[in-house]
Image: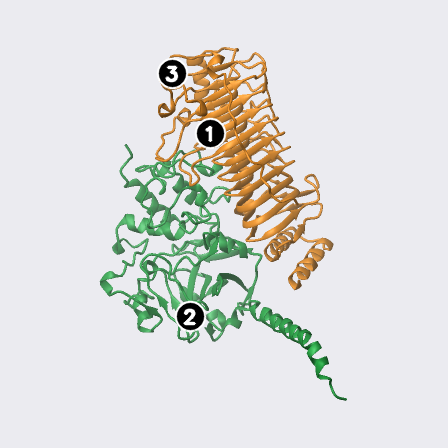
Chain colours: A green, B orange
């Protein structure tokens, strides 16, 4: 049997098509996210120990988002040999292939971390060619691994908090869509935390040196200005790190401004709480609520300078009613320390004429 | 294709399984997440208790369909998280149809940043007596382009039953809105047509508002025609601080700082305080800090409506109640059309009236008495002379092309 060359030519397009389909299929399979967190290889040893594998870099934010007292363990992994450019105003523009990893955990006793903890979920942001993608992984009861779960869930958590009180409450694991409820700028998925003002502090309280300098030395950060030009490492609840107003604004920036900014999901409210906002009205000072419904709590303005109790902002921060509370997601408990900070900030404002 | 088949098997699995309710929520939520463009997601007949917001994000051409507003009921009583019952954001050609969302903790259905969203035979309600504890909005498209709300029903919202905010190209038709603070509200929106609806037993029937402090500053080009607007005499139960909290009990139609609005062919009956009210933002007595905001109603055309009211006094509640009792003293002969008469002096002619293209025109209404209040001058020269408003304007709206499900 010999194959007639013209027959081969006739079938060639179909063969090529079949190959393309197979390749595309393979590519789709590769793109499907791993079902287990451990498949990524971020961690060395048992994943629950959260020990960074080589190439995974733990990091910390100066002033993080409050998430019902959850402790957050953050990691960064850049593609091999890649670096990110420094900028002084917004979240760093990480290269394609970057992963940002955040594990939410509850220590059994916040005063004694050595007594162990329970991991609840690990959220991953992946920088792909067409933008960031979020993947939520939920830890199993045995703490053996975390598994991809797009639907979100409510879990009961119990622990002893920093003041020694026994706490027990529902903890909300957001669904995949809700990731973008916060990680959203002009309808593009974006990270929130890793900016120079959030990374300018040390990784641990004992290490002393700025994480940015660590990164620059490791060759993964370019364009770092000298130390005098780095933003202050403002820690919202540490008055030694900066003035009240700055700390309050940074707290609002990280806890509210992911939505409350002109390109965020709360753009229609006209309340913009980003660090860079300079218009007092957009900041909420003397601003009337618009579509807040019962969220207003029968109060008339978002912020009444000198009068925290008359300020809707504080009312909604204090609430735990899903129809009233702010942020809308990721919190079921009030944060008394943050309430005290914002109360003090508003109380010290000069009353409007 | 693979994804479609997968989603389909998911749907079949769901439809054939009797599931516990949190599982129902998780499965429906999973479907909303995994839906591929063009999918129809069906929710079978039944009453489902749901404890968290259902959300959909970044999808195109999706139909979310129940089996009828009396048959598929999503009950959010006891909702633990999320500020809405259903939240749909960032997409094109989304249809929600034939279902009820009940007792959501916050807003019932919020859609944001959508192009072409269609609400068809959807009901949003809160059970029991109207209460300030109810959610703010029933049907709540905001920042959308191409909004059709048809054959829907909204009850019990502590702000507005049907609320379209900061959107454009809007049709609200053949809906029923009752026992809300505001029945239907069009706010800071452009090119809206509101027709053949029934708004009754609300505090205010149909509102067209332009408000300050918002990113979308200017609404306009709105036509409100052939609606039945009656018995909107419910005591205002909005939480204080909200703008609708200032809507007087007994309001039929309220045009607040709205521009280019045509109101025609409506039946406006037994709204005890205001049949149609045309007011500047100053009437709210709220300070304006927004420097770009335009607080005056201009280019308003009110014609061919039918008014009737029983001989009852206006409300005695609120600031408006005080105004009626102590300043206006209309007694039981309350005018049907009320204009606050606060003028933008930059667009008046030498006769002190607005230049023709900015006028408030009121003509050819049945059984209508009007009053202009001169509210800017402490009500010194209240006038009831219809000839001052006898004019006509062309208000243009374009019918949105929108998709059809």
| Mark pair 3, 1: CA separation | 22 Å
Above or below for A102 versus B260: below
For numbered disc 1, what is the local secondary structure?
strand
Q: Residue B216, can we see it?
A: yes
Please name which of the two marks, 2 or 1, marks the residue nearer to the observer. Answer: 1
Mark 3, residue position: B351
Mark 1, residue position: B259
Circle 2 residues within 10 Å: few <14, some 14–19, many ≥20: many
Q: Marks 2 and 1: same chain? A: no
Above or below for B329 versus B398: above
Residue B152 is left or right of residue A193, and the answer is right
Q: Quadrant of residue B134?
A: top right
- Tell me which chain the residue with mark 2 is part of: A
Residue extending farthest front? A6
For numbered disc 2, what is the local secondary structure?
loop
Please name which of the two marks, 3 or 1, marks the residue nearer to the observer. Answer: 3
Residue A208 locus on image (x, y percent)? 27, 67
Residue B168 locus on image (x, y percent)? 52, 39
Residue at point 45%, 48% (across, down): A327
Which quarter shows the C terminus of chain B? top right
Mark 2, residue position: A78
């Amino acid at each position: 049997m010999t194959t007639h060359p013209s027959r081969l030519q006739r079938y060639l397009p179909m063969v090529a098509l079949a190959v393309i389909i197979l390749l595309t299929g393979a590519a789709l399979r590769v793109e499907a996210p791993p079902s287990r967190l451990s498949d990524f290889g971020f961690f060395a040893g048992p994943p629950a120990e959260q020990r960074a594998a080589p190439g995974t870099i733990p990091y910390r934010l100066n002033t993080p988002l409050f998430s019902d007292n959850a402790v957050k363990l953050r990691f960064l992994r850049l593609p091999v040999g890649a670096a990110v450019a420094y900028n002084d105003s917004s979240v760093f523009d990480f290269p394609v292939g970057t992963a940002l990893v955040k594990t939410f955990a509850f220590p059994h006793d916040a005063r004694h971390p050595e007594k162990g903890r329970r991991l609840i979920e690990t959220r991953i942001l992946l920088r792909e060619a067409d933008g960031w993608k979020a993947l939520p992984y939920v830890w199993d009861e045995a703490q053996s691994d975390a598994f991809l779960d797009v639907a979100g869930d409510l879990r009961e958590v119990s622990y002893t908090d920093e003041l020694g009180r026994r706490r027990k409450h529902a903890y909300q694991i957001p669904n995949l869509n809700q990731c973008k409820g916060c990680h959203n700028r002009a309808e593009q998925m974006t990270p929130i935390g890793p900016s120079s003002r959030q990374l300018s502090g040390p990784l641990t309280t004992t290490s002393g040196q700025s994480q940015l300098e660590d990164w620059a030395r490791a060759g993964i950060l370019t364009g770092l200005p000298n130390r005098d030009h780095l933003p202050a490492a403002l820690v919202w609840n540490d008055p030694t790190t900066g003035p009240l107003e700055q700390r309050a604004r940074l707290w609002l920036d990280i806890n509210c401004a992911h939505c409350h900014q002109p390109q965020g999901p709360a753009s229609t409210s006209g309340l913009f709480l980003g660090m860079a906002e300079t218009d007092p009205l957009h900041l909420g000072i003397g601003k009337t609520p618009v579509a807040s419904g019962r969220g207003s709590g029968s109060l008339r303005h978002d912020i009444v300078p000198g009068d925290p109790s008359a300020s809707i902002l504080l009312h909604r921060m204090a609430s735990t009613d899903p129809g009233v509370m702010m942020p809308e997601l990721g919190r079921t408990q009030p944060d008394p320390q943050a309430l005290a900070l914002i109360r003090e900030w508003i109380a010290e404002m000069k009353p409007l004429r | 294709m693979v994804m479609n088949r997968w989603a389909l098997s998911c749907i079949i699995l769901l439809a054939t399984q009797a599931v516990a309710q949190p599982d129902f929520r998780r499965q429906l939520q999973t479907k909303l997440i995994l839906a591929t463009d063009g999918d129809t997601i069906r929710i079978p007949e039944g009453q489902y208790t749901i404890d968290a917001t259902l959300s959909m994000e970044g999808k195109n051409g999706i139909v979310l369909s129940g089996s009828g507003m009396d048959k598929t009921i999503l009950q959010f009583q006891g909702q633990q998280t999320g500020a809405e019952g259903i939240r749909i954001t960032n997409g094109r050609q989304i249809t929600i149809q034939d279902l009820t969302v009940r007792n959501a903790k916050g807003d019932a259905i919020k859609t944001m940043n959508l192009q072409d969203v269609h609400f068809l035979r959807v009901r949003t309600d809160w059970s029991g007596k109207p209460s300030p504890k109810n959610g703010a909005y029933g049907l709540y498209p905001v920042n959308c382009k191409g909004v059709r709300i048809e054959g829907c029903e909204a009850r019990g919202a502590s702000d507005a039953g049907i609320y379209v905010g900061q959107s454009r190209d809007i049709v609200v038709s053949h809906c029923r809105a009752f026992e809300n603070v505001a029945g239907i509200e069009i706010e800071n929106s452009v090119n809206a047509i509101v027709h053949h609806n029934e708004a009754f037993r609300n505090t205010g029937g149909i509102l067209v508002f332009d408000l300050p402090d918002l990113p979308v500053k200017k609404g306009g080009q709105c036509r409100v025609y052939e609606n039945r607007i009656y018995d909107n005499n419910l005591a205002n139960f909005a939480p204080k601080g909200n703008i609708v909290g200032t809507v007087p009990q007994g309001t039929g139609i309220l045009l607040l700082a709205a521009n280019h609005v045509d109101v025609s062919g409506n039946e406006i009956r037994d709204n005890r305080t205001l049949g149609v009210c045309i007011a500047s933002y100053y009437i709210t007595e709220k300070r304006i800090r927004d420097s770009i905001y335009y607080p005056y109603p201009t280019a308003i055309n009110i014609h061919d409506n039918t008014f009737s009211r029983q001989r009852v006094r206006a409300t005695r509640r609120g600031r408006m109640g005080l105004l009626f009792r102590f300043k206006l003293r209309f007694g039981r002969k309350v005018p049907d059309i009320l204009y606050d008469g606060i003028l933008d002096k930059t667009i008046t002619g030498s006769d002190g009236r607005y230049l023709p293209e900015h006028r408030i025109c009121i003509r050819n209404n049945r059984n209508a008495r009007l009053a202009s209040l001169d509210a800017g001058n402490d009500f010194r020269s209240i006038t009831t002379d219809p000839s001052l408003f006898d004019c006509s304007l062309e208000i243009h709206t374009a019918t949105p092309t929108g998709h059809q499900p």
